Amino acid sequence: MSQQSNLKEMDNNNKDIQDDNNDDDPENEEEEELDPRVQDELEKLNKHTDEINKLELQLEDANCLFRTLLTDSTHQLKTLSQKIGVAHIEKARPYFEALEIANKAQKECQSAATAFQRANGIHAAAKETIALAEERFLTNSSNWQFDNAWQEMLNHATMKVMEAEKQKTESEAEHLQRAAFYQAAEAACQRLEKRLKKHVVKAQHYFEQKEAFNKTLEAQKIQVQTLQTKVSTAKADYAKSLRMLEEISESIHAQRKFKRQMSALREPGVGAEILNTLPNYDLDECYDRNSVVSGKSSSLGDTTDENDFKTVTRTVSCPEQMSQGLKSLTLQQDHLESQTNHSSLANQT
């Protein structure tokens, strides 16, 4: 039931992410395509989900097999003990326990012996390296100089020899200790075998069968533990992909929200208001007004002052303003003509 609930929760999370990515405005859905990162992470999620489903089914089968083996082994050993006799089994148990300890000590002693041989070989190789280097240097001593490079090389080789010798000594001590323990365990087994020989013979089949069952159960237990590790790894990968998908979704939402805010705050381009507010005017109408103004300008004469010329620089925003500008231009022209006439009269007099 827990595995089914986990699978349902994973599917719901997957659907929530997909729905969350589709909860944007219709315009954004039409304008923007699906982020390729979302598609990749969704494919990863589906892949991890399938892998988790497969591994959990295998784990469930392995657990069932382990429980079945345990039940069958217990039942068979119980039947065998009743057939042989519980008394013989209990009296022979110390010998078989000592035999198990002796077998374990033998394996450890063999491992220590292998480690000692390896350390001894490393030590011999390091010593040989130093010997060859010294011999080579002495052979070419007339041509070579004992410089810092040779000194560094010899120091390095000497350190390797010392480390190898230390490892060799430790491995030798470990091997001697394991060997002594094995010898003691083997002697204890021999003593128990002589004393309990009758019970050992009758109960031997029971303990051999028990050992076979223990090996089978241990192998199945290792398989269960391996599957549990794989399931944990697959769930961690699923959670990682889910977090990545959530981060991508949040990033997409933040980008879309920013775009909406920018669209709401965006103003028209430079000059748009001026173009929208330019007046419509008729040149013929302006010409007629200009004629009227120029007809009146003669009565003003020289009374116009310089302030009238400033109106020329004003920006025309409507037909009336354009007429005022044309009027100012006409007044300026009349003023210049009057000045020219006065100067010519003065020259004649």
Image (tube, grey):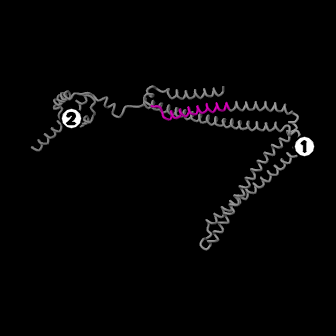
Q: Mainly helix, strand or loop, the magenta region?
A: helix
**Circle 2 — which element?**
helix
- In-front residue for pair 66/160: 66
Tell me the number on the disc at residue 195.
1
The reply, left or right, for residue 205 in relation to residue 269 is right
* Disc 2 versus disc 1: nearer the observer: 1
Figure label count: 2
The reply, left or right, for residue 240 in relation to residue 266 is right
Give the residue at mark 2: 329
Give residue 91's position: percent from left, percent from top: 88, 38
Q: Earlier in the sequence, mark 2 or mark 1?
A: 1
**Circle 1 — which element?**
helix
- In-front residue for pair 338/82: 82
The N terminus sits in image quarter: top right
- In-front residue for pair 138/193: 193
The C terminus sits in image quarter: top left
Q: Choose top left, top right, bottom left or bottom right for residue 49.
A: top right
Give residue 336's position: percent from left, percent from top: 17, 39
Residue furthest toward the bottom? 142
Which span of residues is magenta-colored? 33-61
The reply, left or right, for residue 156 in relation to residue 111 is left
- In-front residue for pair 317/134: 134
Q: Is residue 40 magenta?
A: yes
Assess disc 1: are there few (<14), some (14-19) or many (≥20) residues with their C-alpha within 10 Å of its C-alpha.
few
Which amino acid, by three-letter code, is at mark 1?
Answer: Arg
Q: Choose top left, top right, bottom left or bottom right for residue 95.
A: top right
Q: Is residue 164 magenta?
A: no
Which residue is depicted at the point 83% across and 41% down? 96
Spatial separation of the CA atoms under disc 2 and disc 1: 142 Å
Q: Choose top left, top right, bottom left or bottom right for residue 133.
A: bottom right
